[in-house]
Image (spheres, coloured by chain):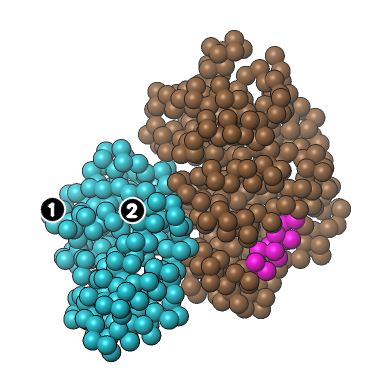
Chain colours: A cyan, B brown
Amino acid sequence: MAGIQEVYDLVAKGKAKVVAGAVQEALDAGCDPTELLNKGMISAMDEVGAKFKAGEIFVPEMLVAARAMKKGVEVLKPHLATGVAGAAGKVVIGTVAGDLHDIGKNLVAMMLESAGFEVIDLGVDVAKEKFVEAVEANPDTKIVCCSALLTTTMPALKDAVAALNEASFRSQIKVMVGGAPITQEFADEIGADAYTEDAASCAQRAKELVA
Amino acid sequence: MLTAKQNFLETIKPDGKPDRLLKQYEGTAFFPPNPASAYIRGNRHRGMEPLKDRFGTTILWPENQVAAMPHVTAENKVIKEITEWKEELIMPDLAANCSDPAQWEPFIKQAEELRAKDQLVMAFMPTGVFERLHFLMGFEDMLMNFLLEPEDMKELCDAIGEYRYQYMKLIVDYIKPDVMLSHDDWGSKNSLFVNPDTWREFIKPQYMKTYGYMKEKGVIVMHHADSFMEPIVEDMVELGIDIWQGVLPENDIPKLQKQLNGKMTLMGGIDASIVDRSDSTEEEIRKEVRRACEAYGPGGHFIPCITYGGPGCLFPHVDPIIDDEIGRYNKETYGI
C-alpha cells in the first residue's frame, strides 16, 4: 500500500516533521494500524540498522530515524490494540553498579524501542538486586540488558549477570551485555546469553533471541 | 643508547632513528595544571560535591568513580534548544580571567623544573570541541543537531573552536610546552560517531588554527582519541597531528603504519580491556603487551601504550608490568 511505503520512507529518512501527517493519512485511507507499525516503521528501522552495521550511515542518521518513528507511533498508538506497541517484548536495561555512563545504554534503549520492544530503563549505577527486582515486578520481561563502560565495572557486570543467573525466572529471560571493554569472550565467561558491539546489532540480536 | 627524550623525538621524526620502543609516556612529563584549566574546570577531586564548570555543565566525581564526568540530563543541560544557543550559553571569558602574567608565573617555574630533568613538558587540553558539544546538550541532541540544525551547530562549533584556540594560546604562550596532549574522542571502538564528511564539515575546521599555531611554535601535537578513526587519518595528518595517542587495536594498525609512512606516530595498541582489570594476571598483561610490540613495533613510528588519555592505568599492578615487558622486548629485539 502506498501509505505504508510512504511512512517507511519517511521513517528511514528521519523526516520527523511530516511522518505524523503521513501516518494519519494512511490510517484515514484504511491502512491497518498494526501493519503500518510493523511494515511501515519497524521494517524501516530494520533497514536503518542494517545500513548502520554496513557502515553506510552513522549514529546521527539512526537517531533521527528513531525520532521520526516515535512521532509516527504517537499518532498510531490510539489506534493499536493494547500491547501491540512494544509487542516484540519487554526489555529491562541499565548500566551496572558503580558506572554512571549512559550514552551507549541510551542508544541501545532507543534502538530496542524502534525494533518494537517495550523498554524499562533503570538508568545508571544499577545495583544487581534492582535488575532482579525489575524482572520480578515485570514477569513478562523477555530480555535484560546490562551495560558497563569501564574495566573497573566489569566485576559489577559479572555480579549482575550472576544474580540474574541465580534467579528463579532465569529460564524465562535472555541476558545481553555490552559496553566498551566487553567482549564475546567475557560475555561467555560470565554466563550472559549474548554480546553485541553496537546498538543496531543489539536490536537485531534481541529480535532473534525472542523469535 | 639514546635518552628517553631523544628516543621520543627520534620515534616521531619521519626519518628518525629510535633505538628501542618507548615505554608508554616515557620521555615526557605530564603537566596538566595551569590557570586556564583551574578557571574552566574548577577544583575537581574524587568524592567532591557536584559542581558546574564555567560552561554551566554539571560535573560529578563520586568517591567510587575513577574520573570526573559530565552529568547531562534533560533538566540540567545548558543548551536545550540549539537554535537558542546564543541565549542559553555564556562563553567563558578567558582573556578577562586568565591573562594576568602573575597567575602563570608559578606554572612556568614548575614547567622549567621539569624540563631541566631532561623531560619533554607535556601540557594538557582536555574536552575537545566534539566533547564540549555533548557536555552542553547531551550526546543524542548533539548527534541529531548535526543533521537537523546544521547552521546553528556550525556557529556553535566555530565559537567553541575559537574558545579552545584562546585556551591553547594561553598555555603555549606562557608555559611553552614541548608537547600538547589534546583530547577529543571522535568515535566508538568500531566506528566514527558521525559520517567522516560531517566530521570534516563541523569538527575538523576547529582544529586548523589551533594545531596550526602549535606547529608554528614548535609544539608537538599529541591528539588523544581512543576510537576507531581509520577513515580520517589523512585529515589528522593534514591538521598537523604528530602523534595519535589512544589508537585502539580495533584499528588496523599495521595497515595505518604503511599508509602513514611516518607522517603521524601511533601511540597505544594495548587493549585496556585485557590488561587493566582488577583480576588481570601478570601473564595476561605480558602476553598482550608482547602482542602489541611484536605486531606494531616493526612497522615503526609506534609507541606501545595504554589507550587512556594520560599516563597511568586504573589498577596499580598493571603499569610496572607493561613497562617491564616493553623493556624485555627491547632487550630481545634491539639488545638494549
Name the magenta segment's main secondary structure: helix
Q: Secondary structure at mark 2?
A: helix
Q: Residue at 30% of width from left, 73% of height from top?
A: A40
Quarter of the picture holding the N terminus of chain B? top right
In-image side of B329 versus A181 (left or right): right
In-image side of B317 versus B58 (left or right): left
Q: Residue at 16% of width from left, 66% of height from top?
A: A140
Q: In the picture shown, does residue A199 fall above or below B114?
A: below
Q: Position of residue B120 (x, y in %)?
A: 74, 33
Quarter of the picture holding the C terminus of chain B? top right
In-image side of B75 versus B222 (left or right): left
Q: Chain of mark 1?
A: A
Q: Between residues B60 and B191, which one lies in front from this camera angle?
A: B191
Is-magenta flag for residue B155?
A: yes
Q: In the picture shown, does residue B135 fall above or below B82?
A: above
Q: Residue furthest right?
A: B101
Q: Position of residue B29 (x, y in %)?
A: 69, 35
Q: Which residues are magenta?
A: B154-165
The three-letter amino acid code for the residue at tag 2 is Ser
Q: Residue at 50% of width from left, 67% of height from top?
A: B144
As drawn, the label of residue A201 is 2
Q: Position of residue B315 (x, y in %)?
A: 47, 36
Can I make out residue A84 in this image?
A: yes
Q: Residue beneath label 1, please?
A: A171
Q: CA distance from mark 2 to mark 1?
A: 23 Å
The three-letter amino acid code for the residue at tag 1 is Ser
